Image (tube, rainbow, N blue to C red):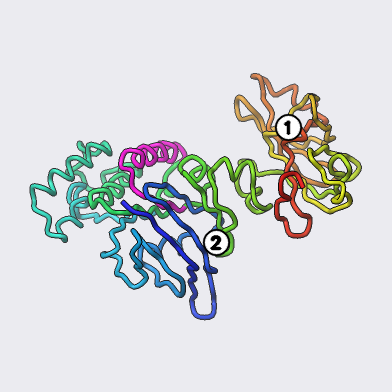
Amino acid sequence: MSGVNLSGIVKSYGALQVVHGIDLEVTEKEFVVLVGPSGCGKSTTLRMIAGLEEITAGDLTIDDRRVNRVAPKDRDVAMVFQNYALYPHLNVADNMAFGLRIRKMPKDEIKKTIDDVAETLGLTEYLERRPADLSGGQRQRVAMGRAIVRHPKVFLFDEPLSNLDAKLRTQMRAEIKRLHNRLDVTSIYVTHDQVEAMTLADRIVVMNDGRIEQIGTPMELFNHPANIFVAGFLGLPPMNQLKGTLTKSGAMIGDTEIKVDGIDAQQIGRDVIVGIRPEHVTLTAGKGTSELPIELDLVEPLGSEALLHARHEGNELVFKAETHGDIAYLSGVKSVHITASLVKLFDGETGVALGARV
């Protein structure tokens, strides 16, 4: 078991630079998730850690050992791919044992290792089957088993659940988290799915355009996004963002004032972006709330709650509301109420979060 450290890591393809000098320290036994939109550099970063992509500049260390020029097989990492990468002509046991045989491990040790890992992953009854006879979730467990049997220092996951249906993804997320807790091995996981990131990670690394936007625990990023990109990326639905101007007690959004705690008098008149989480509104007034008039477009029922799609002075917004078993009453909603302490403020030009309430 060991930590992974990236210092000033750059990746270029000719004149095109796709990863721009990122710094990241993954501590021993930590589960870190790299998340971001397609093309942000997260998979490229993972492949550099694995040794499948050459590092253009910077230093990569695993267990305090610089591995920039070390071959993938000598880095003591194991990677689980999106497409499983199983040998179709080999059964489950042979797929999992393949790497151990290459390393000349004794047959009795291989069998014991495979049996132990198969029991952990619920694959014992499938050891004689071939990949074509397995479901998607079972194939992914085999791919993970093949990585686990090596007892690597670091596990690398490259969007391993993206080929599964929604129900299987939910099941496999839980299995991966339980597995990490049981094995206690440093893990780095790449996904574009924010739900996977929020549910799996000890810490999340949000990437955009080859740069790291913010690093923190899931709740740190959800409650205190560093900028409007993170605010708009994490959260389902994402944070509503409205242009406004600071006043003595809050922010004016068109003709409506939204109260915000702790406004600095010297900041009055500053252009800002007001961030409101869909979950952070109520349909009734309360202490410290402001009323935001809306024009309701659509109600999407989700069971215990519903999504309210609405507009305010040309801004498209989404809010969450409890249904209490019936959505009929929601069709008459004409405003929502926002608690001052839950409003987030960002600089109107840079999009960077404004300190502790300005």
Residue placed most toward the observer, 301 or 275 = 275
Q: SS at mark 1?
A: strand
The numbered mark at residue 245 is none
Q: How many numbered discs?
A: 2
Residue placed most toward the observer, 247 or 178 = 247
Report the amino acid beneath label 1: Val
**Category of crowding for the residue at label 1, using alpha-carbon neighbours closer than 10 angstroms: few (below 14), some (14–19), many (at least 20):** many
Q: SS at mark 2?
A: loop
Q: Which residues are magenta?
A: 166-190
- Look at the image and tell me whether residue 80 can be seen: no
Q: Which residue is mark 1?
A: 281
| Percent position of residue 74, x then y | 26, 65
Residue shown at 39% from the left, 58% from the top: 4
Report the amino acid beneath label 2: Cys
| Percent position of residue 202, x then y | 47, 44
Mark before the other along the chain sequence, 2 or 1: 2
Which of the 4 image quadrants contains residue 165? top left
In the rendered image, residue 310 lying in the magenta stretch gets the answer no
Residue shown at 80% from the left, 46% from the top: 315
Which of the 4 image quadrants contains residue 283? top right
Q: Is residue 228 above or below residue 122?
A: below
Q: Which residue is mark 2?
A: 40
Furthest-right residue in this view = 255
Residue placed most toward the observer, 266 or 87 = 266
